[in-house]
Image (tube, helix red, strand yellow):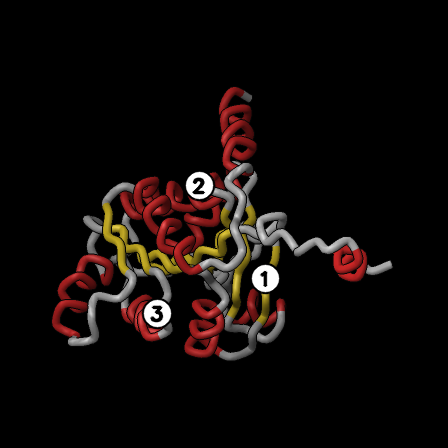
Amino acid sequence: MPIQKLMQMLGAKPRLRDTHLKYKICVSGSAAGKSVESSMIEKAKEVGQQIAMHNGVLVTGATTGIPYAAAIGAKEIGGISIGFSPAATELSHVKKYQLPVDMFDLIIYTGFEYSGRNLILTRSSDAVIIIGGRIGTMNEFTIAFEDKKPIGVLEGLGGTADMLHQFVEYSGRGHGKMVYDTDPKALVERLIELIDKEKVVTISKKEYAKVKMTKQSRRRG
């Protein structure tokens, strides 16, 4: 007997908090170039770790640079990393675009080039975090902003991220759902607070301790 029918017979309502759902948080930033510095790489790894530690799934453009560093951070502590590729196939992803595959649990091959990929990437996420970045990062930011997505900006590292506060001020479109911080942990936690305000389904925080223990055990090993 279907569980829904059984619950109706018993007069019970579905408990929206009893789910396996996780936060889907996109990390956007430079894939290459002078804007990818060692300080950004380390901070991006921390962001990836914090997303995993707060019961989140890391979502990126399945690319190199800053997003890739975030994927490394997430995977280092047993987190989940999903990539959205501009390519239509795995062969094209590796040969034509020369993009990585090793730090992802799942890669979705959109076949929509970079601009189309960016749209699907941000729309599939609960929120977006901006780290550094160039024009492609700005494209993902404007999509998320227009879609009224919660957006976190990791400041103090240069690139597009450090321009966004002023950009939003002068845009004449309001302040959006934005949080700014220089600390990865604080940024992720503040961003999740914004996500929770819009959630119909409550996402459990119980995974935090489990992933944190995994991280600690791996360090000891």
Displayed quadrant of residue 9:
bottom right
Q: Do the residues bearing badges 1 and 3 touch, measured as CB atoms within 8 Å?
A: no
Q: Residue at x 38, y 41 (%)?
A: 46
Q: Residues within 10 Å of mark 2 (few under 14, many from 20)?
A: many
> Horizontally, is 161 left or right of 65 in the view?
left
Residue on which the image places disc 2? 49
Between the residue at mark 1 and the residue at mark 3, the CA separation in whole angstroms equals: 25 Å
Disc 1 residue type? Ile
Q: Residue at x 55, y 38 (%)?
A: 207
Residue 149 lies, in percent from the top left, at 37, 65
Residue on which the image places disc 3? 148
Of 53 and 5, the residue lying toward us: 5
Between tags 2 and 1, which lies in front? 2
Residue 212 lies, in percent from the top left, at 50, 31
**Residue 65 in view (yes/no):** no
Q: Residues within 10 Å of mark 3 (few under 14, many from 20)?
A: few
